[in-house]
Amino acid sequence: MTSSNFIKLLSGLTFFFFGMQMMKEELEHLAGNKMQILLEKFTSTKCLGIITATLVTAFVQSSSLITVMTVSLVGSKIMTLKQATWIIMGANIGTTFTSQMLAFDLGYIAPVIAFLGMILITFFKKKKFHVFGNLLSGIGVLYIGMETMSQAMLPLKNNPFFVEMLTNFTNPFIGVVIGTIFTAIIQSSSASVGILQALAGSGLINLSSSVYILFGQNIGTCITSVLASIGANRSAKEAMLVHLLFNVISMVVFIPLFLWTPLESLFIAFTPEHIETQIANIHTFLNIGTTIILFPFDKWLSQFAKKVAEYIK
């Protein structure tokens, strides 16, 4: 990679994270304290709790925020661990909204979207126009970042070492480790999945490798709830363990399916020309599938988390 491409890559990453942050801040500002109220009030039943958490997470585009908030609510005895289990299931589904959004190929009109947002911010005084303008600008800048990263990484397709490292690991758990470490560092599964989609869109990584990195990204996002539980009471640690167990169980159940069944081929057949959509669909499938599997066992999951928490200081 030349120095100009490296600078282009850094620029793309900057635009990507800046756009994501703009959107996140505006959506959080719109929601205000309503998020916590919604999570407290609409978790009286299992289905309602999962649906509420899914919608709230999709709206604010941050499962980390919802999970940390849930850990705090459980630690404060405002919410039971069983309710937290439902929210964590929904948050894992809601976070896939971002990857689905990024799968749309809007790179060619992203500057127009950002420009429209800037017009609303600059020439209109009402606050609602500013909020909507910031959201549009954030979306536009996010897609500009994705497009810039994809273009900057294209030369790496001719680098045998880089391609070998990303695509030819025979042990799927190497992919899991890569995804876990990367997501733990940036503390955003939405961002790390978006970067994975950009890599795949540039032809640098195939779907087979991406699948196992996705499992790692799901586990890596737990680092935020782990950090939130440090120094907290045992109830908060129990909520953190539910989050971690959810994603570990997902890996244990679905890695064998992707290894030994034609499941991956089905996702390729569904959208054969667009690997970014394939990644988004698998991301959604993993989290919805795990929720369906664990749906009848929410009580068991919370009880197991309580037993494990007894051994954590």
Image (spheres, rainbow, N blue to C red):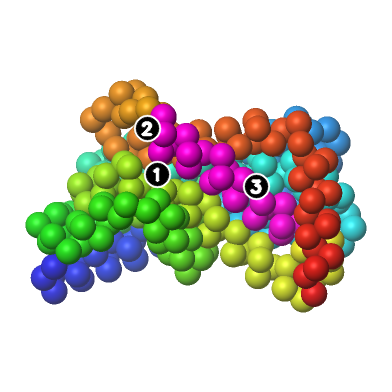
In-front residue for pair 189/291: 291
Query: What crowding class fits label 2: few (fewer than 14 Cα within 10 Å), some (14-19), or many (20 or more)?
Result: some
The residue that disc 3 covers is: 246
Secondary structure at badge 1 equals helix
Q: Residue 17 appears in which quarter of the rendering?
A: bottom left
> Height in image: 257 above or below 1?
above
Q: Earlier in the sequence, mark 1 or mark 2?
A: 1
Q: Nearer the viewer, residue 75 or 12?
A: 75
Q: Residue at x 47, y 34 (%)?
A: 257
Whole-Å distance between the Cαs marked 1 and 2?
A: 9 Å
Disc 2: which residue: 264
Instruction: Find numbered disc 3 in the image and state the secondary structure of the residue it sits on.
Output: helix
Tell me the quarter of the picture where residue 206 sits. top left
Residue density around tag 3, few if under 14, some if 14–19, many if 20 or more, within 10 Å: many
Callout 1 environment at 10 Å: few (<14), some (14 to 19), or many (20+)?
many
Over which residues does the magenta segment extend? 238-261
Going by the numbered disc 1, the residue's amino acid type is: Val
Residue on which the image places disc 1: 211
Q: Do labels 1 and 2 touch, CB within 8 Å?
A: yes
For the point 61% across and 64% down, the residue is 224
Task: Give the position of the N terminus as an image quadrant.
Answer: bottom left
Judged from the image, the secondary structure of the residue bearing numbered disc 2 is: helix
Which quarter of the image is occupied by the C terminus?
bottom right
* Residue 5: quadrant of the picture: bottom left
266 w.r.t. 258: above or below: above
